[in-house]
Amino acid sequence: MAWDYKKILTRIANKWPMKVLSVVAAIFLFVFHRMGDMQERFFSLPLQLHINSNLTPGSLYPRNIRVIVRGDANSVYLITEEDFDVFLDLSRYSEPGTYKAPVQIQKKNSSAETEALEIRLEPMEVSLELDTRVSKYIPLSPDFEGYPQPGYELVSYTVTPNQVVVDGPARVLTGISELFTEAVDLQNRNADFSLSLRIMNPNPLLIIRGEGAAEFRGFIRELIIIRSFDDLPVSPQGLGEDLEVVLHPPAVSVRIQGGDQEELNSLDSQSIIVTVDCSALKGPGTYTLPLSVSVPSNLSLDRMEPETVEAVLTFRDEEEEE
């Protein structure tokens, strides 16, 4: 049987626009159906750095990379974050400087190996400054907030360790001379206390060696309030009627403690009596005698200068004759 090619071509050409549209529509429907079956998943994965051991990041960079995985639902939903590593390879550079490189992704598990998956990274490349890596011992200090209970004070404290080793870019570490712990709350404390405190990192480019924590011990004591009084006169007591005394010095200075600040501020110097006991002295001469101080019952003597006086005794009638 011979083929009538002319008739066949005539049939194909017959209503060909409609046939072309039908084919296009079929292709469109097929693609649309396939697109409808495509699913996307998003992951945020930590960016690993492959750099020379003598260098370290000297500028901020994106710590996480957005990974978009696209494919049919059966494949996409088998994917997890553990199936990929994302990294920036700058290991070929050995000198400080600013370098740009593409972000690379490595598939780790068989579920990510299917060729039907489309993978996009955002961002696709990263510019990073590299600086010389240095280490430095830096003193550690607590950061205080609040105040102890009225009448109490923080008299001393310890921080263990009192210094830490910090690694980081030379340019950043040069300007850091002290690190601080998180705040130590002193509010209304009236007794010794201990805390475990985080060490605050002032720059994400720095790495603080160790556990990143310090032990703090604070020592609280009752506040001693002191007020000084100068030139308080010394009064001789128990002096014989036939004797007369001259004191050197005739006045002293004292420090009084106790009570509260308002009470001490209102204390009158006349309420403080300084005396010397002369009752044991029976005749003229020069004597060194201790002093005594009388203060209100709720207060006490902290210090007196001097604590003794020189008493020069004479008979009254001898002075009258002179």
Image (cartoon, rainbow, N blue to C red):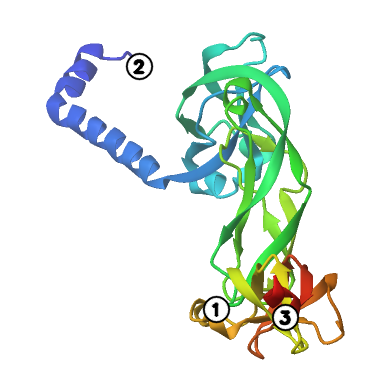
Q: Secondary structure at mark 2?
A: loop
Q: Earlier in the sequence, mark 3 or mark 1?
A: 1
Q: Which residue is mark 3?
A: 316
Q: Secondary structure at mark 3?
A: helix
The kind of residue on which mark 2 rests is Met
Q: Which residue is mark 2?
A: 1
Packing grade of label 2 (10 A; few <14, some 14-19, many >=20) is: few
> Would you say 34 lies left or right of 182 here?
left
Q: Which residue is mark 1?
A: 269
> Would you say 251 lies left or right of 15 here?
right
Q: Secondary structure at mark 1?
A: helix
Foreground tag (3 vs 1): 3
Packing grade of label 3 (10 A; few <14, some 14-19, many >=20) is: some
* Observer-nearest of 56 and 127: 56
> Would you say 121 lies left or right of 168 here?
left
**What's the CA distance linking mark 3 and mark 1?**
31 Å
Q: Earlier in the sequence, mark 1 or mark 2?
A: 2
**What's the CA distance linking mark 3 and mark 2?**
171 Å
Q: Is residue 56 visible?
A: yes
Residue at the spot 32% in from the left edge and 41% down from the top edge: 32
